[in-house]
Image: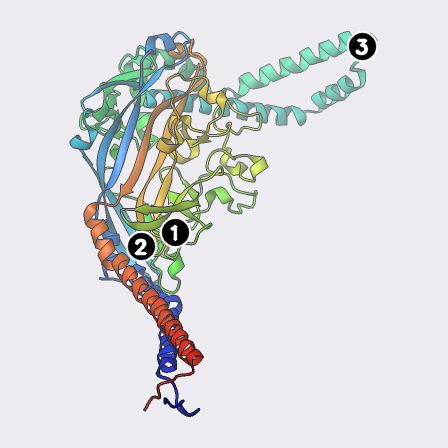
């Protein structure tokens, strides 16, 4: 007959169960505390910019080129537009370029928390990715340089006349006789017996204004107005319309030539255009000028950036601290006459080549784009998977170009530099459009591609637009732990108002429209080599740690539970095997 164990003796199954509990606790501790802390510290070390580190090497030379895609709006009815017809456009492209970025580091700060550099950008045409399109394709597109010149000229003339009017009113208000006449007019206004006197007084004041205006008029202004229209042919190669017949290569990079052997006043106009310092216009070896959208970007950079290295605060890594030695822009309107920096002039975020690590669902982040002189906020949208790498998708919000104006506390974007265009009474453009005049020194209007989300005030005046959120919305997929961009694209469109300009014959019959020129996508899609590298360095390690975590937790808990059940089973039978 079997003997029961004594109370001092412990059944082997309880020991195994206790060991299982210990393993499960250890697994939980490792999975929820030890491993995350180890990974967090490892990620911190890997993303901080330190001279000579792997991250520094990737920072100086991006491991793979960015994709730069350009779509051109080819105009199919240029002659009809000249007679007032609504423009019809057809998108052609993409013309795909590989964008290589190299940062020329100037120096680190003394404490190592900042790094200053100039970024050089180089574009190579990718014929395979662009096929069937080639750079020699003939296009009919908006004559950007001529249209910009005419509108800038119109704006300056408007400013001159406005200055005259302001000085005139000030002079009239300081003239005792005029003040007496105004008071007399106020007293007799609306009284029937004196209506004829009121009319005479108005006539007198208007005559005074005319005399003063003539005395203040610039003697060269009238001459310029008379001869400008006649000299457009010599300046812009005898244009027949507001559109230029050229190639994609010239329009985008090599340049559309003008000011070829100008004489007299035309030469003076060309000299003025050259001295304006526009980045998109370059002087050629023969003295002529050439306009291109991106020729000035292809080569050495000029903007000096200072960014955070992440040392001391990894959540600030790569965030721009200064641009050209200033913490803020001086492009948009400021908040007050004292010069308090407005939200529009603040520089926030990174340059979109990378982002701070440890992203969280529901958060937002900023990128800064020097091309449009502003910071853009990106909002979390959803979880994603890219080639087996988990991450988060971020996209722009309504506050990019839809919600702009005093009702949104960002009226500083309403620079109101354009005359006689489609805009609101307060000077702001309608939703979906942003005036970049003060940014680019040219009357360029920013929208999303195909005017996605823009007001019908603009979209109804153009035929051929096909907005599609999937194709035209800006987004970026980011690996949440490291902040590495996996896939994404900044997508914007550049437009100009097409309109009639006083005394300029070539514009006299134009209907006022917001005319699209091109839209671009600057993006990245991690290639196979980088995906393999990323998986080897991070994802596979995380998977291994995750397996160890759950194996220890579940295995230990399972062994503990089975051993305990076995002990209870044996105890229920009243038979126990002693442990000796």
**Mark 1: which secondary structure?**
strand
Per the image, the residue denoted by label 3 is 194
Residue at (34%, 15%) from the top-left corner? 242
Q: Where is residue 132 in the image (x, y as percent from the top left)?
A: 19, 24
In the rendered image, the residue lying farthest to the front is 1
Per the image, the residue denoted by label 1 is 322
**Residue 192 in the image: above or below residue 253:** above
Total numbered labels placed on residues in the image: 3
**Mark 2: which secondary structure?**
strand
**Mark 3: which secondary structure?**
helix
Residue at (42%, 15%) from the top-left corner? 225
Decide if residue 302 is on the left or right side of residue 466: left
Work out whether mark 3 precedes mark 1 in sequence or the reverse, and give the earlier one: 3
**Residue 541 in the image: above or below residue 438:** below
Return the mark for residue 273: none
Residue at (40%, 39%) from the top-left corner? 373
Q: Where is residue 555 in the image (x, y as percent from the top left)?
A: 33, 69
In the rendered image, the residue lying farthest to the left is 128
Which of the two marks, 3 or 1, is nearer to us in this view? Answer: 1
Task: Quarter of the image for the N terminus: give it.
Answer: bottom left
Return the mark for residue 116: 2
Work out whether mark 2 precedes mark 3 in sequence or the reverse, and give the earlier one: 2
């Amino acid at each position: 007959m079997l003997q029961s164990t004594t109370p001092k003796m412990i059944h082997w199954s309880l020991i195994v169960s206790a060991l299982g509990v210990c393993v499960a606790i250890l697994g939980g501790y490792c999975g929820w505390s030890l491993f995350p802390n180890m990974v967090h510290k490892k990620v911190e070390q890997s993303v901080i910019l330190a001279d000579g580190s792997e991250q520094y090497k990737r920072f100086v030379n991006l491991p793979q080129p960015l994709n730069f895609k350009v779509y051109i709006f080819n105009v199919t009815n240029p002659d009809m537009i000249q007679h007032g017809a609504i423009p019809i456009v057809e998108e052609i492209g993409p013309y795909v370029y590989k964008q290589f970025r190299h940062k020329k580091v100037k120096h680190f700060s003394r404490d190592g928390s900042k790094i200053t550099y100039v970024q050089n950008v180089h574009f190579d045409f990718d014929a395979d990715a662009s096929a069937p399109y080639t750079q020699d394709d003939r296009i009919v597109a908006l004559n950007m340089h001529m249209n910009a010149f005419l509108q800038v000229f119109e704006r300056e003339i408007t400013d001159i006349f406005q200055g005259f009017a302001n000085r005139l009113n000030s002079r009239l208000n300081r003239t005792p006789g005029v003040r007496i006449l105004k008071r007399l007019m106020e007293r007799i206004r609306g009284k029937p017996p004196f209506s004829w006197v009121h009319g005479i007084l108005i006539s007198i004041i208007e005559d005074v204004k005319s005399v003063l205006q003539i005395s203040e008029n610039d003697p060269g202004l009238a001459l310029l107005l008379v001869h400008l229209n006649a000299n457009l042919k010599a300046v812009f190669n005898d244009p027949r319309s507001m559109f230029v017949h050229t190639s994609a290569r010239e329009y985008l990079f090599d340049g559309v030539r003008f000011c070829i052997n100008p004489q007299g006043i035309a030469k003076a106009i060309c000299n003025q255009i050259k001295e304006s310092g526009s980045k998109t216009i370059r002087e050629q070896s023969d003295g002529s000028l050439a306009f291109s959208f991106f020729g000035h970007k292809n080569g050495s950079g000029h903007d000096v950036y200072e960014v955070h290295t992440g040392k001391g605060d990894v959540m600030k890594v790569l965030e721009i601290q200064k641009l050209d030695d200033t913490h803020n822009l001086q492009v948009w309107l400021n908040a007050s006459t004292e010069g308090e920096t407005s939200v529009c002039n603040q520089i926030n975020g990174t340059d979109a080549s990378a982002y701070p690590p440890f992203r969280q669902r529901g958060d937002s982040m900023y990128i800064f784009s020097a091309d449009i002189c502003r910071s853009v906020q990106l909002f979390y949208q959803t979880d994603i998977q890219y080639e087996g790498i988990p991450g988060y998708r971020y996209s722009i919000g309504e506050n990019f170009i839809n919600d702009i104006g005093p009702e949104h506390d960002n009226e500083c974007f309403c620079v109101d530099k354009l005359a006689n265009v489609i805009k609101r009474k307060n000077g702001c453009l309608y939703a979906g459009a942003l005036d970049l005049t003060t940014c680019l020194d040219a009357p360029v209007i920013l929208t999303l591609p195909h005017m996605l989300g823009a007001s019908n005030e603009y979209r109804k005046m153009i035929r051929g637009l096909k907005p599609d959120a999937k194709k035209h919305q800006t987004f970026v997929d980011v690996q949440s732990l490291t902040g590495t961009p996996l896939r994404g694209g900044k997508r914007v469109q550049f437009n100009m108002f097409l309109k009639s300009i006083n005394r300029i014959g070539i514009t006299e019959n134009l209907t006022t429209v917001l005319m699209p020129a091109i839209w671009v996508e600057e993006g990245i899609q991690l290639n196979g080599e980088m995906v393999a590298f990323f998986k080897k360095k991070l994802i596979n390690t995380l998977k291994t740690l995750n397996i160890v975590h759950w194996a220890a937790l579940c295995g230990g808990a399972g062994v503990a539970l089975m051993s305990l059940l076995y002990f209870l089973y044996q105890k229920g039978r009243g038979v126990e095997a002693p442990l000796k």
